[in-house]
């Protein structure tokens, strides 16, 4: 069930920190999402293309959908007509596909580069020591139909606050470095997407500008 008190608390915490809330609606029913929508929340995130496609047409068209999970190249075409922002870009080939499909739809699609900051093994996210070569490659392509809005990362799922804090700090440092040295004049490079139900408060203190919170808003 949608928890309005939790939504109000998290929203106001975000606002105090100049951050925004991407409400994660994965696994939630249409009813739950409509209750969330009734608050005025418009930025919503799903992590699977199929689930997003199943829900989207049954929900109001002014929802700004973010794809927060891993995205396969062969699925980009389904979401390209409407997706607002793709958080999990971690390969040039994926980005080339997004650019191509965005062009077909005569759209500009926002995206974030996902970095692998957790200690846990994961196939997803650019390794932090590859940041430079990856960003150089992206810049070299001169994409016309995608717009880099910033970076995204997921911290380890551990109770160790110090570790999570260090992981957020690592991403914030990379973000600041690129903002200062490459995107100082680019008003669109403004998003640092980090923090989920378990660690969003910490993420906000570490400079997050967008938290992706799901379970804490429901039940
Ligand atoms: C599920 C998910 C979230 C939200 O997780 P909660 O713990 O439910 O808040 C955030 N980001 C990504 C990438 C997710 O897959």
Image (cartoon, grey):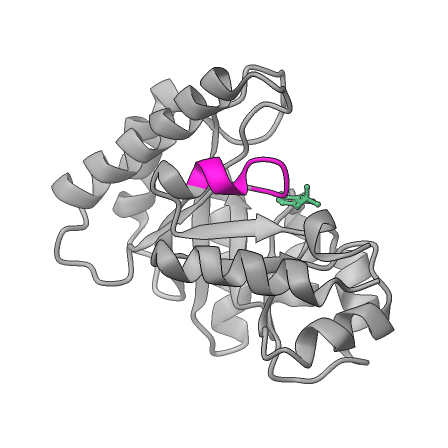
Q: Position of residue 185 (x, y in %)?
A: 13, 57
In the rendered image, is residue 56 in sight? no
The picture quadrant where one finds residue 57 is bottom right
Would residue 56 be found to the left or right of residue 207 on screen?
Answer: right
Up the image or down, 40 lies above or below 75; here it is below
The magenta region covers 196-203
Ligand 1's quadrant = top right
Would residue 125 be found to the left or right of residue 150 on screen?
Answer: right
Q: Is residue 52 magenta?
A: no
Nearest to the observer: residue 139 or residue 15:
15
Q: Is residue 200 magenta?
A: yes
The picture quadrant where one finds residue 181 is top left
Task: Name the residue: 55% across, 15% down.
Answer: 119
Would residue 8 be found to the left or right of residue 218 on screen?
Answer: left
Q: Position of residue 34 (x, y in %)?
A: 76, 77
Q: Position of residue 88 (x, y in %)?
A: 55, 44
In the rendered image, is residue 24 in sight? yes
């Amino acid at each position: 069930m949608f928890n309005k008190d939790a939504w109000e608390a998290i929203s106001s915490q975000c606002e105090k920190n100049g951050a925004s809330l991407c409400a994660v609606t994965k696994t939630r029913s249409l009813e739950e999402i409509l209750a969330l929508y009734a608050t005025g929340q418009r930025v919503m995130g799903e992590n699977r293309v199929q689930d997003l496609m199943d829900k989207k047409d049954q929900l109001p068209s002014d929802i700004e959908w973010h794809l927060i999970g891993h995205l396969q190249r062969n699925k980009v075409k389904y979401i390209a007509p409407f997706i607002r922002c793709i958080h999990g870009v971690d390969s040039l080939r994926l980005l080339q596909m997004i650019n191509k499909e965005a062009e077909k739809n005569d759209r500009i699609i926002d995206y974030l580069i996902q970095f692998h900051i957790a200690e846990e093994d994961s196939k997803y996210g650019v390794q932090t020591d590859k940041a430079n070569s990856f960003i150089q490659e992206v810049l070299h392509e001169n994409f016309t139909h995608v717009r880099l809005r910033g970076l995204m990362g997921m911290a380890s799922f551990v109770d160790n606050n110090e570790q999570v804090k260090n992981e957020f700090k690592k991403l914030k440092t990379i973000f600041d470095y690129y903002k200062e040295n490459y995107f100082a004049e680019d008003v669109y490079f403004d998003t640092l997407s980090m923090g989920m139900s378990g660690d969003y408060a910490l993420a906000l203190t570490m400079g997050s500008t967008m938290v992706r919170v799901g379970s804490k808003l429901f039940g």
